Amino acid sequence: MFNSISAQASKLVSLTKSKSVVSKTKLLTITSGKGGVGKSTFTANMAYLLARRGFKVAVIDADIGLANMQVLFDIKPRYSLFDYIEGRNTIEEVISPTAYENISLIAGKSGYQYSSLKTSLVLTRIVDDVKSLNNFDYIIIDTGAGLNEYVQEFLSISDNILALTTTDPSALTDVYALIKMLSKDKEKLLICFNHTKNYNIGETISKSLVNLAKKNRLNSNFMVKYIGNVSTSANISTTSRLRKLFVQEFTHDEITLQLQKIIDILLKEIK
Ligand SMILES: Nc1ncnc2c1ncn2[C@@H]1O[C@H](COP(=O)(O)OP(=O)(O)OP(=O)(O)O)[C@@H](O)[C@H]1O
Ligand SMILES: [Mg+2]
C-alpha cells in the first residue's frame, strides 16, 4: 500500500518536474490504438518535411520491442534509447544523426522485452532530457500500437497528441477509446485520416466522433480537431522497402501535398 502511494507521489513529482523544463523544443506524440495504420511511415515523412522547412527534429522510436524507424531512415544506430535507460550511455550518445539534414533519431530496439523496463517514468525523463538540450524545435514520438502503460506515459507528458486512424471501424473504435481516455485530463486531440482519399470523409467521421462524445457526456471542454487526410499509394510501401522516404522521392505527389497541408495546420496547433 505504502509503496503504491509513494510510487504515485513520485510519479506526480516527476510529472510536475517535466512541465518545468524550459526549452524551445515542442513535443508531438503520434498514436493510434490500432496497429498498422501508418504511424511510423507518417512520422518519418512528416519529420522530413519539417526538416525541409528548417526545423530541427528529433524522432523517438517508442515502439518498444519493435523498432522500425531506423529501417525507414535507413541507418544502423550504435545505441538505442534503452542504452540510456539502462545507464550505459548519455542522452547525447543515444541521439543518432540520420542521413537527412536536421533529423536525429533516438532509436528503439527490436526484441526488447517489456518486462525488462521495470521502472516507469524513465520515458518521461528521456523526453525531459532531450528537451533540456534545447537543440531541437520538435520531438516527434512514434508510439507503438495499443494503449499500454508506456504509450500512456508518453501521452501523459504530451500536450500535443495526434491520432492517426483509417476509416476502418476497429481503428475508429480505438480512436474513440483514446478520446474517452484523454478527455479526462487533456485539452485536445488532433486527428488525421490515413488511407483516406477524400478530405470530407475524414471531416464527417471526426464530427460523428465529436457527436458521440457529446452524447456520452465526455468533458465538453475537450476538443477533437481534424487536421487532414492522406490517400493510399502503393509507392509508399515501395519507397519504404527501398529504405527511402516517399515525400523526398515524390515531391509533387498528391500525398506529399496532403502532408504539407497537415504540417501547415500542425505548426499552428502545436504549443
Ligand atoms: N498511405 C499509405 N498508402 C499505402 N501504404 C501505406 C500508407 N501508409 C502506410 N502504408 C504502409 O502500411 C504499412 C504499415 O505502416 P506503418 O508501419 O507505418 O504503420 P504503424 O501504424 O506504424 O504500424 P505499427 O502499429 O505496427 O507500429 C507499411 O507497409 C506502410 O508502407
Ligand atoms: Mg509503427
Image (cartoon, rainbow, N blue to C red):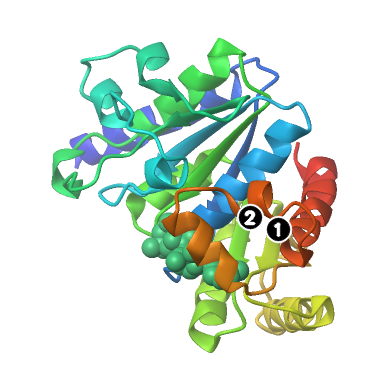
Q: Which residue type does callout 1 highlight? A: Leu
Answer whether labels 2 and 1 touch (C-beta < 8 Å): yes
Q: Quadrant of the N terminus?
A: top left
Q: Which residue type does callout 2 highlight? A: Leu
Q: Is residue 111 above or below residue 172?
A: above
**Few, some or many residues within 10 Å of mark 2 (<14, 14–19, 20+):** many
Q: Is residue 202 above or below residue 118?
A: below
Task: Give the image location of residue 18, x and y in percent.
Answer: 52, 25
19, 76: nearer the viewer: 76
Q: Does dot 1 land on a helix, a strand or a loop?
A: strand
Task: Give the image location of residue 105, x and y in percent.
Answer: 46, 31
Q: Which mark is residue 55?
A: none
> At 53% from the left edge and 38% from the top edge, which residue is drawn?
157
Mark 2 or mark 1, earlier in chain: 2
142, 185: nearer the viewer: 142
User: Image quadrant of residue 19?
Assistant: top right
Task: Give the image location of residue 70, x and y in percent.
Answer: 39, 40
98, 175: nearer the viewer: 98
Q: Quadrant of the C terminus?
A: top right
Q: Which residue is mark 1?
A: 190
Q: Which residue is mark 2?
A: 162
